[in-house]
């Protein structure tokens, strides 16, 4: 059986519109090549959805097949499976090489045709699994393998002006989904029906604002009652009851970029215990918002919010870090773990970073006021401070519905 790999011509902006300008991608690749020079690399094999999307514009759908972008000091090529035909070429700023499945490991033959062999190769150590790493060594026979995942994350953490423009649109569309959800909330309505109202509103808004984008992965988590206790609990068919705590979470996805809005609400009324917890979490949220500015460290901001909760005997109910970076990420790919508001992250905030503030406390089922309380806004950090780009209101005065 013969090996068949095919080149497709480089994608051009006459074929489609990239998520960003070609210059934006060239700047990103230049940053990657600086990292390569620092580590004396001859090639980088990117394998994650978020890094391939970040450097090329192409967001793959693996479906059990490996994908890559191979970057050398003078070339960059996406490697895609034959089942996707010419679509990756239309969606990538780089040249695209298609491999077929008709001989096992054609993927690595395609990678080698770009990277060469016996060089020094950079990888994403937080993504490339052990089996694929063994195949990389078998086919490329590298002199050296260097994990540069942390360097790539550092580059992605500071957003360009074009990225911030897209993220602002995402925040606006998250608000649209939130208002659609608020309108759909009624006693007796199922979580899934409320969630679909928000998702549909956001997808229509994305289609209007980004008519050349791929419409994929926008979603809503709308939770009620005890289903609010986990931030990522799936939607169910449970019906809303009067007095329920509700959690609204809208996630528009635009060209691989995640944005979010999250709010606590109540159906009809909130009891005294619930109001106490809700107002305490709103206070933590507002404290966190006030602390986000250039020069502040993630750990120091986390410590201040910890003190706030400890003073109210609520620290034991916090459920995760108080916020994170935004960019090309989703609920199943990407993470800029070096920019989270946690005790062990000492990253200093700087202009161009985009972060959330999202404290959450979870009150266990055996206590009055049980459930999860969470507010979430997105902030863009500038040279002088930060700007909150989330618009949907929070707190008891706005979000007791019905």
Image (cartoon, rainbow, N blue to C red):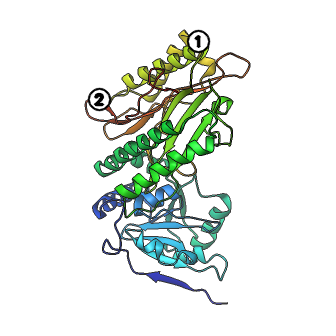
Image quadrant where residue 187 sits: top right
Between residues 400 and 342, which one lies in front from this camera angle? 400
Instruction: Using the image, tell me which numbered label, if any, was put on residue 272.
Output: 1
Between residues 213 and 303, which one lies in front from this camera angle? 213
Q: Residue at x 41, y 60 (%)?
A: 55
Instruction: Give the farthest residue toward the right.
Output: 366
Residue 373 in sight in this render: yes
Residue 158 drawn above or below residue 298 = below
Q: Residue at x 35, y 55 (%)?
A: 209
Residue 192: image location, x then y, percent: 62, 45
Quarter of the image for the N terminus: give it. Answer: bottom right
Distance Cα–Cα, label 1 vs label 2: 36 Å
Residue 37 in sight in this render: no
**Which residue is tagged 2?**
385
Q: Residue at x 59, y 45 (%)?
A: 193
Residue 347: image location, x then y, percent: 43, 33
What SS does tag 2 mark?
loop
What SS does tag 1 mark?
helix
Instruction: Give the farthest residue toward the bottom.
Output: 1
Residue 201 drawn above or below residue 89 = above
Image quadrant where residue 230 sits: top right
């Amino acid at each position: 059986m013969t090996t068949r790999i095919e080149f497709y011509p480089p994608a051009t902006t006459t074929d489609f519109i990239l998520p960003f300008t070609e210059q934006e991608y060239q700047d990103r690749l230049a940053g990657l090549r600086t990292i390569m020079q620092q580590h004396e690399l001859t090639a980088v094999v990117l394998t994650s959805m978020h890094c391939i999307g970040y450097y090329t514009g192409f967001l793959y759908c693996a479906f059990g097949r490996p994908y890559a972008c191979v970057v050398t000091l003078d070339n960059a090529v996406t490697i895609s499976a034959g089942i996707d035909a010419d679509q990756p070429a239309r969606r990538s700023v780089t040249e695209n090489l298609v491999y077929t499945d008709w001989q096992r490991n054609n993927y690595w033959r395609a990678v080698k045709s770009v990277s060469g062999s016996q060089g020094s190769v950079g990888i994403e150590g937080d993504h490339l699994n052990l089996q694929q790493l063994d195949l990389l060594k078998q086919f490329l026979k590298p002199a050296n393998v260097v994990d540069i995942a942390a360097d790539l994350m550092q580059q992605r953490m500071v957003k360009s002006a074009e990225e911030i423009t897209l993220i602002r649109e995402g925040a606006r569309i998250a608000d649209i989904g939130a208002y659609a959800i608020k309108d759909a909330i009624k006693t007796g309505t199922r979580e899934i029906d409320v969630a679909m109202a928000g998702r549909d509103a956001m997808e229509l808004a994305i289609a209007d604002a980004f008519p050349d984008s791929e419409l994929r992965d926008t979603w809503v988590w709308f939770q009620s009652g005890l289903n609010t206790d986990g931030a990522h609990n799936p939607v169910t068919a449970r019906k809303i009851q009067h007095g329920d705590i509700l959690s609204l979470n809208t996630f528009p996805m635009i060209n691989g970029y995640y944005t979010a809005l999250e709010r606590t609400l109540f159906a009809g009324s909130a009891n005294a215990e619930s109001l106490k917890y809700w107002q305490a979490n709103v206070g933590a949220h507002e404290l966190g918002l006030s602390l986000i500015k250039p020069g502040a460290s993630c750990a120091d901001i986390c410590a201040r919010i910890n003190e706030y909760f400890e003073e109210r005997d609520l620290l034991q109910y916090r459920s995760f870090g108080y916020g994170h970076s935004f960019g090309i990420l989703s609920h199943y790919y990407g993470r800029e773990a070096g920019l989270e508001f946690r005790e062990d992250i000492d990253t200093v905030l700087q202009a161009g970073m985009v972060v959330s503030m999202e404290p959450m406390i979870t009150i266990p089922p055996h206590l009055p006021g049980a459930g999860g309380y969470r507010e979430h806004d997105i902030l863009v950090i500038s040279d002088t401070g930060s700007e909150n780009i989330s618009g949907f209101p929070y707190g008891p005065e706005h979000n007791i519905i019905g």
